[in-house]
Structure formats: C-alpha cells, structure tokens
Image (tube, grey):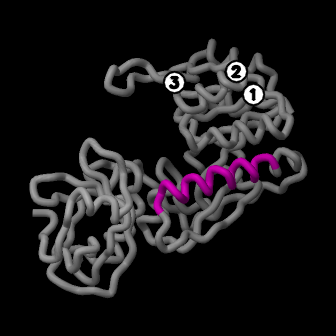
C-alpha cells in the first residue's frame, strides 16, 4: 500500500521500520520539526525524522495542518492510508478524509480507557492489571474513533513505563501490519460510552514523592514516572530520582530507610528502590548506586 506515516518520538520508530519491512511504499513521513536540545541548544531532529532520513524517505514537518497549502500537499501524495502514532498535531477533517482508507491511529491503551496524551504512564500509576494496543480509525474527536483491532497484555508488577513503552511499541508495529493486510475487511467496533478515562499529560509537579502515602501508590508513582520525568525525593541536600521499585513487607516511620538496601517506609508498607539516579549522573541499579551514595538504615528521606 501507499502510506503516509505520521509519528515523532522513539515509540513510533519500530512502527515505521515494520511498515518498510512489510514492503509498503512510504509516500512521505510527517513528524514534529527539529527543536533545540542538548547543551549547545542546537536543533535536533526527532527520532522519526532521523530514522526516516536513514531509510531515504521524504520527511515533512509542518508546524500546522490547518491551512489550505498543507492540506493540499498532503492530499497530493495520493495515499491509500495514513498511519498515525504519537504524531503530536491535531489532524483536521480534510486530512482525515484525504487517504482512500482514511487515517489509522496506533494507540497504547485498551480504548476507551486512557484516551489522550499519556496512556502508558497513567495505566501504571492507576495500578491497571493490563493494557494493550488499539488500531483505531481516526475521527475528529480525541481518540474516539472505532477500533479495528486490539491486543491486550498484562502489566508486570515491577514494570516501568519505559519497559512497557518498548513492549507496546513493538506490539503496535506488529498489529498495524496485520490491520493493513486486512484493511477493507475489518469490522469497526464503536467505543462504548462506559469506561472512558483520559490520560492527562504528565505534569512535573506529580513527580515529588510524599512518603506519607501508601506504599502501593508510591510504587506505582515511581514505576509510572520512570524514566521520565522521574519521581524524586531529597536525600540530605541532594535531589535523587527513583526509577524502579518493588513492594516490601517491612514497616516503619514514613520516609525512613529501614535497612542498608534502600528499603523506605511509606505511610503504610514500604518500597525497595531498585534503580536510582543522582543529579548529573546516569541511572544505576541499587547496588551500584549505593556504592556511590550510601543510604544507611535510619536515614530520613524527603526532608
């Protein structure tokens, strides 16, 4: 098929690769424009932009698709279908209607649960037992379109957003290839009105740890915000990101280190930190981290 691909971050790259490997013709790749990044604040292409150029594909990065020129340029590509995954721009109706089979979105949740910007983070933070991928026929509403295919997967009890992100990205790549093989024969399934939730964009203000909360909530917060933006706490005068955890049966005063292995008491229960990161340094497993920054039993965190 002749496909317009629309995506921007790392999550989208395996999907682009899968479409190319499946033999589809990529008419053009749409992504967000390069933006300043790094210490030099030089413009850096997005992960999809970089991958598309490496594959020799045409890259377009308009700042809007709402004007006539952008819409005419899109329609002129004569695509059979557009595949959209974490693109970052609203698609107006003229764009949705341009390809023969419309625009298919790869969404990382079991719709109608977790429509919106941060479905992977929110699923973990809410303690969902499972999530998955939906291939959705796009319409004007936010993730409201009918679902063509869906696949569920369990969320492991110690899984972080980063780990689940990578699994779902590959699942999405596999499922869109299946959907394109069956396009025109799939029965669209309207989303029910019941069970709708919205995955609001993560606010950095959510990242500070309040040790008086129950361990089960803090475990979800730590795993759900890892690796970005990273839940954090103060250890002495230093701000430290906590990027992995598991529940512990130990108990004690909230915020107190209960052993020398980074087990911290919460409002009820405790969590053992499995991965952490000091400011200006890389993320480390707990054993390595504690060699550089001891957190002995009795240390109070968050003060």
Tell me which residue sits at (10%, 53%) in the image: 237
* Residue situated furthest top in the rendering: 69
* Residue situated furthest front in the rendering: 291
* Percent position of residue 216, x then y: 35, 77
Left or right of 263 in this view: 140 = right
Residue designated by label 1:
98
The Cα atoms of the two marked residues, 3 and 2, are separated by 21 Å
- Mark toward the start of the polypeptide (3 vs 2): 3
Quadrant in the rendering for residue 103: top right
Query: Does residue 172 belong to the magenta stretch?
Result: yes
Q: Nearer the viewer, residue 22 or 179?
A: 22
Q: Look at the numbered disc 1 and give the secondary structure of its residue.
A: loop
Q: Which residues are magenta?
A: 160-177
Residue designated by label 2:
74
* Percent position of residue 93, x then y: 65, 32
The Cα atoms of the two marked residues, 3 and 1, are separated by 27 Å
Q: Look at the numbered disc 2 and give the secondary structure of its residue.
A: helix
In this rendering, the answer to whether 268 lies above or below 217 is: below
Quadrant in the rendering for residue 243: bottom left
Mark 2: few/some/many CA within 10 Å (<14, 14-19, 20+): many
Residue designated by label 3:
45
Residues at badges 2 and 1 in contact (C-beta under 8 Å)? yes
Tell me which residue sits at (72%, 38%) in the image: 17
Mark 3: few/some/many CA within 10 Å (<14, 14-19, 20+): some
Q: Look at the numbered disc 3 and give the secondary structure of its residue.
A: loop
């Amino acid at each position: 098929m002749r496909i317009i691909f629309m995506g921007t971050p790392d999550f989208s790259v395996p999907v682009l690769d899968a479409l190319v490997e499946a033999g589809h013709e990529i008419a053009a790749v749409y992504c967000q424009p390069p933006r300043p990044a790094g210490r030099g604040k030089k413009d850096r292409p997005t992960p999809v932009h970089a991958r598309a150029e490496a594959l020799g594909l045409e890259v377009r990065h308009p700042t809007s698709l709402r004007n006539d020129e952008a819409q005419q340029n899109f329609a002129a590509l004569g695509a059979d279908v557009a595949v959209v995954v974490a693109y970052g721009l609203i698609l107006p109706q003229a764009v949705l209607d341009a390809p023969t089979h419309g625009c298919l979105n790869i969404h990382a949740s079991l719709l109608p649960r977790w429509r919106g910007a941060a479905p992977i983070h929110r699923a973990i933070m809410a303690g969902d037992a499972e999530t998955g991928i939906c291939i959705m026929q796009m319409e004007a509403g936010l993730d409201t379109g009918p679902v063509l295919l869906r696949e569920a997967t369990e969320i492991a009890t110690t899984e972080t957003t980063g780990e689940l992100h990578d699994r779902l990205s590959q699942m999405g790549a596999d499922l869109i290839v299946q959907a394109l093989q069956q396009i025109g024969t799939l029965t669209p399934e309207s989303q029910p009105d019941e069970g709708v939730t919205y995955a609001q964009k993560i606010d950095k203000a959510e990242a500070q740890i309040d040790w008086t909360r129950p361990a089960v909530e803090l475990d979800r917060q730590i795993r759900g915000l890892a690796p970005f933006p990273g839940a954090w706490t103060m250890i002495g005068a230093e701000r430290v990101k906590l990027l992995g955890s598991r529940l512990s049966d130990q108990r004690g005063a909230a915020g107190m280190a209960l052993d020398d292995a980074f087990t911290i008491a919460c409002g009820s229960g405790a969590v053992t930190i499995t991965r952490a990161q000091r400011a200006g340094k890389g993320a480390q497993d707990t054993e390595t981290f504690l060699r550089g920054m001891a957190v002995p039993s009795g240390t109070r965190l968050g003060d």
